[in-house]
Image: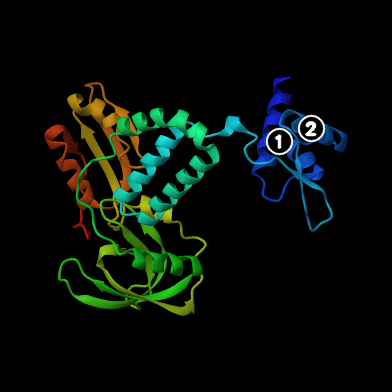
Amino acid sequence: MYGRAEDLLRLAVRLQGSADGVSIADIEEMFGVGRRTAERMRDAVARLFGGLDIRPADDRRIRWALPAGRLTLLAPTAEELAQLHAAATLMWRENREAAAATLDGIAHKLRAVLGASAMRRVEPDLEALIEAEGLAARPGPRLRIDGAMLAALRSAILKCRKIHIRYRARGSGAVSRQKICPYGFLYGNRPYLVAFSLNPRVLDYRTYRLSGIVEIEESEEPFTRDPNFSLDAFARRSFGVFQEEPFDVVWRFKPEAAADAREWLFHPDQTTEDQPDGSLIVRFRAGGAREMCWHLYTWGDAVEILNVPDRPTTS
């Protein structure tokens, strides 16, 4: 009985969420039922939610859709809208202005779908939840990133176009012209572009500070993305964004700091070992020794490094 009710609700969601509508064949495939059962399910949804609209199709199949607004139980809650607002605020802080603007746009669309009367009921809880998140007024420095430059980079990434950039080195301040294949972004304390360098002496993936890109020029020359390259795997090689050869990391947190350390995810692939004396050992493999040192400094003498790379860092 409950399974049948769940199937009807899933079908109603599909009927309202599909732009092209849903055919009887779609229902058969979705639920693994025969034609007669599929027709009965369609008719049941029509009775429960006040009828269905017929959508035109090019394949001569009749398709139905549930008009917008019929599934009021799917209306976003104050908690969901507050989390969307929090996500947009975090994106603004991380200099991801395009992502923040997109999230704000989604929030406004959801408010429009809810309608004025529903929003009047939700607003008091929404304002309280947003204030409780503590995100509305948290000052702090952030890098200024040119929005037009970000848009140009995203365009090149989507089109798989090689680009020329003028890039300012962080240490010397010298500006060089480089030809690269842009792949994606890494966001941390500083946002970075991940790209394949076409410099004959490099021919490898590199990270480029977005704040260091002085100028960008998109070419008409396409490149083929390496299907074996994973931005996620590339990021996992490093503790932060500095890329260097990964090494085995072993940290021991003293008993008085072990509880706090357990609340941290230092690396996606980490393992932890509780010790008899109450201390905690954390192990993972990654590069980025400099950023590890920056982070460990915040722990003071509560952490001990049990292994040290036998070579100087190249970060």
Kindly indicate whether the residue at mark 2 contacts the one at mark 1 (C-beta within 8 angstroms).
yes
Q: Which mark is residue 41?
A: 2
Is 235 situated above or below 182? above
Nearer to us in this view, 284 or 172: 172
Q: Residue at 68% x, 41% y: name it.
A: 67
Q: Please, which residue is most extreme toward the top here?
A: 1
Tag 1: residue type? Leu
Q: Is residue 302 visible?
A: yes
**Could you tell me which quadrant the N terminus lies in?**
top right
Could you classify mark 1 by the number of other residues whose Cα lies within 10 Å: few (under 14), some (14-19), or many (20 or more)? Answer: many
Could you classify mark 2 by the number of other residues whose Cα lies within 10 Å: few (under 14), some (14-19), or many (20 or more)? Answer: many
Tag 2: residue type? Met
Image quadrant assignment for residue 281: top left
Residue for badge 1: 11
Mark toward the start of the polypeptide (1 vs 2): 1
Q: Is residue 225 visible?
A: no
User: Is residue 124 left or right of 223 when viewed as pictured?
Assistant: left
Image spot of residue 249 (x, y percent):
27, 44
Nearer to us in this view, 38 or 58: 58
Q: How many marks?
A: 2
Is 22 situated above or below 160? above
